[in-house]
Structures are given as C-alpha cells and as structure tokens.
Image (spheres, helix red, strand yellow):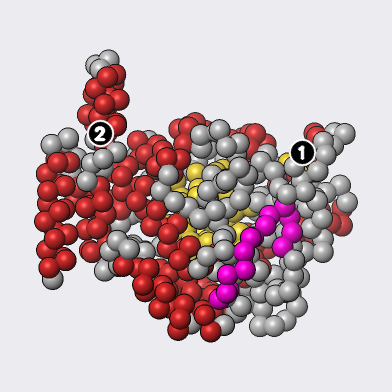
Amino acid sequence: MKKEQTIQSSFNEAAERYAALGVNANDALNNMDKISLSLHCWQADDVSGFENQAGELTGGIQVTGNYPGRARTIDELRADITEATSYIAGTHRLSLHEIYGDFQGKKVDRDEVEPKHFQSWMEWAKEKNMKLDFNSTSFSHPKSGDLTLANPNDHIRNFWIEHTKRCRLISEEMGKFQNDPCMMNLWIHDGSKEVPANRLKYRRILEQSLDEIFSKTYQNMKDCIEAKLFGIGLESYTVGSYDFYLGYGAKKGKIVTLDTGHFHLTESVADKVSSLLLFTPEIMLHVSRPIRWDSDHVVILNDDLADLAREIIRCDALDRVHIGLDYFDATINRIGAYVIGCRATQKAFLQALLEPSALLQQYEEEGKYFERLALQEECKSMPWSAVWDMYCLQNNVPIGEDYIAEIQKYEREVTGKR
C-alpha cells in the first residue's frame, strides 16, 4: 500500500507540472489504452515455426545466440507469449508468420496452407483477448532461393503467388473471426549479392505478381507491403526496395510497412511518417533496432524510437498507424526480450503523449524558436516516469524493474527445464 501511495503522490506532482504546460496527464493515460502493440510470435522461438524444427533459417535474415529455453511447440510458444503479456500493460495483438500454423505434425506445403491450420490460433487469441495479424513466409523453404515473387521461373513464382493468395485468405478469416481487420504483411527477401544486369526486369515481375495477388478484394483484412534495404548474401540489390513499395503503395492504395531496421542508419524513419500519411491510406510499423545493419536487436528507449513516437502523435495519426514489433534475440532470455521491447515502445508513446504540443506549435507560429527548442529540451527531463509508474499500477503489471524477478522465476520453473 505504501508503494501505491508513493506512486500516486509522485503522479500528482508530475500531473501538476504537466498541467502548467497545458498537458493533461490523465488524458495521456487514457490515450495509452488506445495503443495496441502487435507482438511478433517469432521472438520466442528464433523464427523456427512448426513446419520443420530442424530447418535452416534462410532469406538473408539471421538469429544470433543460443540462450536456453526456446519454445519448441505451439503450446510452449503460447505459454511464453501469455507470460510476456502479463508484464505489459494494455490489450495487444499477436502477429503470426505462416510457418506457425497448427499443422498437427502433417506436411503442409506453403501453397497448400488453409484457414483451418490457424483455427486453433484464432480460438486461443479470443480466449486471451488478443487480436491476430498475419505474415506470408517466403524464406526458409526449398523454393526460396534468392528470388520468389520476382522469379522469372514461372513454376517458382506461381508457387509463391499461390502461397501469398492463401495467406490473404487466412487473414480474411482471422479478421472475420475476431471482428477486427487482420493486418497481412507481405515481405520477401528477393535480391542479389551483386548488381543484376537489369534491375527493372525483376521489379516489373514483382509488380505483376503483386497485381495478381491483390486482384481479389477482401473486407476483413488489410494488405501491407514491406521494403528492405538488403539481406545477408543479397547485399547489392533488393527487388522490393523502399522506393518500389512506396510507389506501389501510393499508386494502388496499399499500406506501406516501415520496419525501422530496413533503412540506412542515417535515415530518419520518423521523417517518413508525415509523407506517407499524405499519400497512402495507413502505415504499418515494425519497430526494431539495427546496429550497423538490420540486426533486429531488442528495442530500447532510444532517440530514434522517441522521435518516431513523437511524430505519430504530432500528426494525430494513432488511428492510421499500426504498431508492430519485429526483432529476434537469442542471446538473452526471450520472454525478457519481449517485455523490454514492448515496454520501451510504450514509454516512447507515453512521452509523446505528454509533449506540450499546443505550446510548442504556438512558439513556432510566433517565430519563438529559442523558446521552442528550450521547451523541447526541458521535456526530456520532465517527470514522465511518474506517469509511467501510474500507468503500470492502473493496469496491474509490475512497476519499474519488478518484472525482472518474475521472469527469472518463470525461467527457473518453465523455460529452464526445456
């Protein structure tokens, strides 16, 4: 009780300071409840899935580390996700890759997958008060190679077109079941280690493949197209570059996915938000943390993440931006990695919601640029953490570092025995 009283007292003091700047801290807390993160199922099992447990991860992506306790079955994966969400305030979503189907030990190739293979996921998610999102899976398959939807070989390309069509149908059934649109993300690794003789050739093929895939209209799912800078072994040329998908998305009215690890390290992903909102219907985020390359480190509360969250709030775009996570770290406790990344993302958005936007805009309109910059700097040391503690208290999740001991206990009792 004493701890709760201390948190309440600290919050009251913080709320007064924010009120002096025209910010209502309680409104920020209420708005936090509107933010649902889409957790990525692949953090708990190193992107293994349930097609072939011994399969090699391919497609220009890589998971490093071999920390014990990886989820090996659907039941273990679901248990780990349930555990992780118990430390994350709010109601959230779960993003599944196609390789995570409930195949019941049967061989189901990618061009044979059906909604029935995800029925148990839909029922489980409903029981857990979670919504599902979905991803087609073009990597880690005998037909993956360097090119899938951009492959000149009709047999290979048509295989992946059929796979992606089926993933859209699965997404439609998920959306219908949960009475909420399922975000279906399409990402392919297609590229080349060296510069091809004709870049346009493969991009034209990819455009034609996408046109065929999207030829059928659905009502309960939303299509998202994700670019990439490069993949390991495919460094010189990526067919589905950012420019390609931005042009396609703007022309065809598709949602462009911004993965924060899929750009040059000096690029500001935050700066792209306002432009995309003008020309594409919505935005899908995959929040990651690159270190020199798309290394998918665990998300932390850094300047890049804070800038991204601020830009979304400044654009008043929470209803048009979908926030998913995308990283995989096998060097540390996997449930801990989930929780660190999710809570860091939430902290960034809380800070953004607490920004005195009206006053900053007033300074800007009046040409008071010293005042604008000074206030932006002072906001960095405002008592936002007291508001964060209140948010955790209201949602009955561990406050501060308390979740560390709980995850250690789960490791001793569950993951450490695998």
Q: Nearer the viewer, residue 173 or 315?
A: 315
Q: Label 2 amino acid?
A: Glu
The residue that label 2 is drawn on is 378
Task: Say what secondary structure mark 2 lies in.
Answer: helix
Q: In which quarter of the image is residue 22?
A: top left
Q: Residue at x 15, y 53 (%)?
A: 10
- Residue 95 seen in render: no
The quadrant in which the N terminus is found is: bottom left
The residue depicted at 35 percent of the width and 47 percent of the height is 349
Identify the magenta region. 57-70
Spot occupied by residue 276 in the image (x, y as percentages of width and height): 51, 35
Q: What element carries label 1?
A: loop
Give whichever of 305, 259 is nearer the camera.
305
The image position of residue 250, as x and y in percent, is 58, 35
Indicate the position of residue 160 as horizontal and vertical percent values.
76, 57
**Is disc 2 surrounded by few (<14), some (14 to 19) or many (20+) residues within 10 Å?**
few
Location of residue 214 in the rendering, given as x and y in whole percent from the top left corner: 66, 50
